Amino acid sequence: MRKPNRSAGRARPPAPPAGLAPRRVAADLIEGVLYHGRPLDEALEAALGAVAERDRALVRMLAATVLRRHGTLRAVVGTFLTRAPKGGPRLDAALLLGAAQILFLDVPDHAAVDLSVRLAQADHAARHYAGLVNAVLRKVAAEGQAVLAGLTDPALDTPDWLMARWRAAYGAEIAATIAEAHRHEAALDLTVKADAAGWAERLGGRSLPTGTVRLLAKGPVPQLAGFAEGAWWVQDAAAALPARLLGDVRGLRIADLCAAPGGKTLQLASAGALVTAVDRAESRLDRLGQNLGRTGLDAEIVCADVMDFAGGPFDAVLLDAPCSATGTIRRHPDVAWTKRPQDIASLAELQAALLDRAVQLVKPGGRLVYCTCSLEPEEGPDQIEALLARRPGVTRLPIEAAAIGADPAWITAAGELRTLPCHLPDADPRLAGLDGFFAARLAIG
């Protein structure tokens, strides 16, 4: 006997709105960063399979905006809460995402509210607070801009321990300008093989004094002119400076240590050096190999721990040491919320060991450039002072700003390079700033 079709005539549940899927992934990313300390780009790469191609930029923008303006968003949302709800991480993410879209992104208020309510409804711990999400975000839409106008301290979007460090290292005024720079999305910086001015004109950007081409991001990078033919690669303007400290490298054997993702390897190879790129991350070296192929450049790639690498001696070594990456918060706002004070001490120990190994790989009379994308003194100038104290045969070679197109303000009294996120000011904050980098150039006796 045939069973009756109980679903006959029953209405199907409505399909979820098109914008819900990318917001669900963005909420997952936010939870990963804030609750589990997972780097945003790592989590995003793992989630790409669940994101339609057209939505990938949106997902990253949603998550990055919440992280970039995290303190501000919490303050605005908190204004309309009488007490902290116990709805778990998804409720937290739903409120922050909704407020970010209302206050900072070009999303209609009603859509931002509705999608955040749906995020809460789909979670077992947050569903009981869906009405709260609706009420709070409606108040954010109605009154949030007035609250936002009173939240002028840029330190609000930086963890207290980092602000304390930057005030001690740079003074309160510069620390505040660093924090303000982190509130704005960074421009797209490109290092070109040749003709920076021509490529800047072709891409609708500008050529910086350092030689970098800077433009506002316009869709997927691979679709930009010059990408397929390998005329350029993406690299922050500050990150492009350390390789230039080695001067004319044509025909020289150079080791790029901790090389991945490979921007400096590409620079050195393009300048005519015989480059050995060393890194222990095989997947990141695969990406370097792909970029070498795309740009038509050549380098030896070695997958190894630098401490075990037995190559050399080299005419010069470039060591871009693993670090806390606090200088890259403009581009990677998750760094502010995933790093801890104790990370800096452990990384400083590793940097010292890597510096000693790098010295051993340079032939007598050769050069060593040490750099980190950190704002922390322990990972920059303190490392060099300690190295010079324990190795009398190593001497500092002061850097000249004009030789690399740098602002003289970027060169310290000791002759080392120190860029800050607040450097390169511009009337359009989207075109301002640099990653925070430290670099020193050394002669090996």
Image (tube, grey):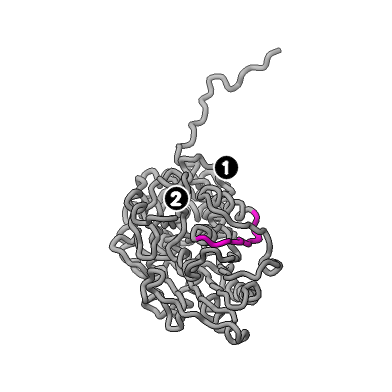
* Mark 1 or 2: the one toward you: 2
- Alpha carbon distance from label 1 to label 2: 29 Å
Q: Residue 444: which quarter of the image?
A: bottom right
Q: Is residue 360 visible?
A: yes
Q: Nearer the viewer, residue 363 or 18?
A: 363
The residue to which callout 1 is attached is 49
Tag 2's secondary structure? loop
Q: Is residue 79 visible?
A: no
Quadrant into which the N terminus falls: top right
Q: Amino acid at mark 1?
A: Gly
Whether residues under marks 1 and 2 lie with C-beta atoms below 8 angstroms apart, the answer is: no
Q: Which residue, as the protein is rendered here, is positioned at the far top?
A: 1
The residue to which callout 2 is attached is 231
Q: Which residue, as the protein is rendered here, is positioned at the far front?
A: 251
For image coordinates 39% across by 51% down, the residue present is: 217
Tag 1's secondary structure? helix
**Where residue 184 appears, x then y in whole percent?**
38, 60
**Where residue 222 appears, x then y in whole percent?**
46, 45
Answer left or right for 350 relative to 415: right
Numbered tag placed on residue 170 in the rendering: none
Magenta span: 272-282
Q: Nearer the viewer, residue 11 or 432?
A: 432
**Where residue 310 appears, x then y in whole percent?**
70, 67
